Each structure stands twice: as structure tokens, then as C-alpha cells.
């Protein structure tokens, strides 16, 4: 009997045929790793309705539509299960309770860490993500409202602190006079680790010369994000850690440590 069997015994609502929870955990973990690895905010959602996450959505680090809702429902359901089981002195029930609590904390850790990574990027480059419709579409409605309010508060603070003493034409924080933008943008040439999912040629740009190397499925490479992004979006590679640990085991290990 493994952990899934224990969880299914306590919670019969888990479907052993579709494995929806397993797919969701994999999608959540890969989205978490990708978001923490990419220097820019990744697109929020792809895929079909509320079904099983698509492979393209999982490897590109994007939330399949409906994933966040299902994860929230699972967390809520597990909290209710823990509350119902608390106080039972049966040793078997107590062990199952420990397993469920561990599983619950893993989901909560992944969700919190994922959202913190996105909020950190929005905080750092708020004007950038508010500057164009395409960039605004990368954010959820809640994130967009947060970014808009955050930037308004920051601008008002600057006005009351020092910008108010400047001439009106020098008070804008998004000035592009002289073809020089004041908007700070993410470094798209920052280094990332990717794991190839298919054999093929990989183009990398160096300081002095560009190079094309032949990559094989499973190879872990370090590339500029601007070079890796097309591969990730096409599903030919996935963002990962230096050891290639883009899996649910990485999430569990990160939570334990």
C-alpha cells in the first residue's frame, strides 16, 4: 500500500482511473518550477476547459484552465477531512491523518510559492507588465487589480515625497523621451536551465559567437531565456533546475528541506 492508496482509502472521492489529482500535482509542480526559473512573468493559462492538464500547458509552465480552481477545492476538501478526523484515537486513523496533513501542506506550499514568485515579478516590474495589452493578459484579474493599485500607491508616494517638486513634464514614470524608456524590464537574456523533451538542434548565443548544438531528449542545458523561450513555448523543452528536477519529487524535497 502506497500513499495514494492510503489517501484513497480515507477519501473515496479520489478517482483511481483518471488520476486527476496526480495530473494536477504534476502540472502545479511544473508551473511552480517554471515560474521560479523564468526571468519574466509567464502566461497564466492554456489548454481546454477543466479537463486533464495538456502536455503543452504542463511543460511550458502555464496553468491549464481550471487547475487553480481544482487545487483550491482539493485543499478545502482536505482541510475538512482533517477536521473531521481530528480527535479520533484509532492508530490507523491517526496515521492516515498524518499522511493527509503532509499532502495538504505540500499543495499549500506549492500554491504559496508559485503565487509569491509571480507577485515578486509584478512588484519588480509593475509598469512593464501594465504597459501593453499582451503583457496585461499574462496576469489574472486579481493580479492585474493588484498591479494597478500597487503602481498607483507607488506613484502617489513618489509625488508626495519628491516628484511634486519637479516640473509636470518630468513627473511621469513611464517617459520614453529620447528613445530611452524609464520602464525597467526583465532581463530576457538571463540564464535558465532547460531539459529537452525531444531530439533536435538548439541555438545558443554566446558573447563572441552563436552556436548550434545537437541536443537529445533528456539533456539539461543552460541557455539565455530569449533562446530557451521558443523551445519551451513549443513544448520542445521545459524549465528545470540545475539537476533537471522538474518533477513532483522536487516539490516534495523542497517542502521537506
Image (tube, rainbow, N blue to C red):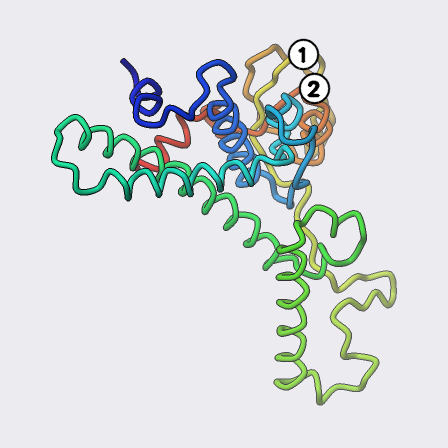
Position of residue 226 measured from the top left corner of the image (x, y, whole percent): 71, 35
Residue 87 vertical placement versus 28 (above, below)? below
Q: Could you classify mark 1 by the number of other residues whose Cα lies within 10 Å: few (under 14), some (14-19), or many (20 or more)?
A: few
Mark 2 crowdedness (10 Å alpha carbons): few <14, some 14-19, many ≥20:
some
In the foreground, 161 or 142: 142
Q: Quadrant of the N terminus?
A: top left
Between discs 1 and 2, the one toward the N terminus: 2
The quadrant in which residue 225 appears is top right
Q: Residue furthest right?
A: 178
Q: Position of residue 238 (x, y in %)?
A: 60, 25
Mark 2 secondary-structure assignment: strand
Please give left or right for residue 78 compared with residue 143 in the image.
left
Quadrant in which the C terminus appears: top left
Quarter residue 4 falls in: top left
Q: CA distance from mark 1 to mark 2?
A: 6 Å
Which residue is label 2 attached to? 202
Judging by the rendered image, the residue that carries numbered circle 1 is 214
Q: Is residue 129 above or below residue 158?
A: above
Amino acid at each position: 500500500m502506497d500513499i495514494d492508496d492510503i489517501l484513497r482509502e480515507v477519501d473515496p472521492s479520489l478517482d483511481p482511473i483518471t488520476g486527476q489529482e496526480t495530473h494536477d500535482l504534476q502540472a502545479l509542480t511544473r508551473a511552480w518550477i517554471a515560474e521560479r526559473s523564468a526571468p519574466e512573468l509567464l502566461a497564466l493559462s492554456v489548454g481546454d476547459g477543466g479537463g486533464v492538464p495538456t502536455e503543452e500547458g504542463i511543460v511550458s509552465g502555464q496553468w491549464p484552465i481550471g487547475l487553480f480552481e481544482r487545487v483550491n477545492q482539493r485543499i478545502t476538501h482536505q482541510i475538512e477531512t482533517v477536521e473531521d478526523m481530528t480527535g479520533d484515537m484509532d492508530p490507523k486513523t491517526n496515521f492516515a491523518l498524518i499522511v493527509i496533513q503532509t499532502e495538504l501542506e505540500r499543495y499549500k506550499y506549492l500554491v504559496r510559492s508559485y503565487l509569491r514568485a509571480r507577485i515578486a515579478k509584478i512588484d519588480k516590474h509593475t509598469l512593464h507588465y501594465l504597459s501593453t495589452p499582451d503583457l496585461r493578459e499574462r496576469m489574472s484579474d486579481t493580479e492585474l487589480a493588484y498591479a494597478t493599485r500597487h503602481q498607483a500607491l507607488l506613484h502617489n508616494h513618489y509625488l508626495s515625497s519628491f516628484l511634486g517638486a519637479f516640473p509636470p513634464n518630468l513627473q511621469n514614470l513611464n517617459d520614453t523621451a529620447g528613445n530611452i524608456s524609464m520602464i525597467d524590464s526583465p532581463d530576457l537574456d538571463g540564464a535558465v536551465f532547460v531539459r529537452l523533451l525531444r531530439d533536435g538542434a538548439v541555438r545558443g548565443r554566446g558573447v563572441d559567437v552563436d552556436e548550434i548544438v545537437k541536443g537529445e531528449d533528456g539533456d539539461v542545458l543552460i541557455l539565455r531565456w530569449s533562446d530557451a523561450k521558443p523551445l519551451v513555448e513549443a513544448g520542445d523543452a521545459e524549465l528545470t533546475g540545475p539537476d533537471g528536477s522538474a518533477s513532483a519529487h522536487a516539490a516534495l524535497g523542497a517542502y521537506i528541506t
